[in-house]
Image (cartoon, grey):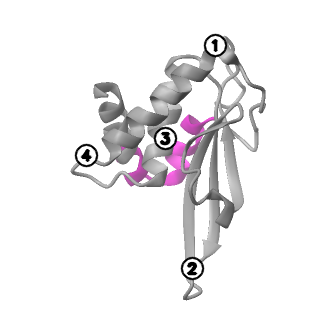
Amino acid sequence: MLEALMYLGLARVMKAMPFSTIAPSLGKRLVETPMARIPSDENTIRCVSKAVGVMSRHTFWESQCLVRAIAAKKMLERRKIESTLYLGTARDAEGKMIAHAWLRSGPFYVTGAEEMRMFTVVALFGSEKRGERMEGA
């Protein structure tokens, strides 16, 4: 839980920066990680998802979808578990443009799954493969 809180804080700082500055640290643009199920990762993915979800409700700063997705992505990267961060847009009931971010690891949605179907993916960032660095990441 403490780790999730620290990464939520880091992610909030990152969100305040220009997106072009933080984008390279999110993974390789337009690379989607496999949907393959890796049983040895499942418990860790669930624990990261739960920790980020619980702690995001207790921060004194805004910890909405992008902050949660970045925090979970960084926690999974630390454990060498692949993930893909998705950014999507849609229009709300009044016609205003809205955005959403969510994170997937294998077949599991780690953050943001509740609303993701309402959004059209406009960008995605895949993480490193196990044990190797992707170019440009």
The residue to which callout 1 is attached is 40
**The N terminus lies in quadrant:** top left
**The C terminus lies in quadrant:** top right
The residue to which callout 4 is attached is 58
Give the foreground label among 3 and 4. Answer: 4
Q: Nearer the viewer, residue 75 or 137?
A: 75
Q: Which mark is residue 70?
A: 3
SS at mark 1 in the image: helix
SS at mark 3 in the image: helix
Q: Residue at x 48, y 51 (%)?
A: 66
| Labels 3 & 2 near each other (Cβ < 8 A) | no
Q: Position of residue 50 (x, y in %)?
A: 43, 35
**Mark 2 vs 1, N-terminal side:** 1
- Badge 4 crowding class, 10 Å Cα cut-off, few under 14, some 14 to 19, many 20 or more, is few
Q: Which residues are magenta?
A: 13-27
Q: Nearer the viewer, residue 10 or 43?
A: 43
| Labels 2 & 1 near each other (Cβ < 8 A) | no
Q: Horizontally, is 107 left or right of 98 in the view?
A: right
Q: Residue at x 58, y 60 (%)?
A: 115
The residue to which callout 2 is attached is 92
Q: Residue at x 50, y 19 (%)?
A: 78
Q: Horizontally, is 38 left or right of 8 in the view?
A: right
**Mark 4 vs 2, N-terminal side:** 4
Q: How many marks?
A: 4
Q: Main secondary structure of the magenta part?
A: helix
Q: Nearer the viewer, residue 29 or 1?
A: 1
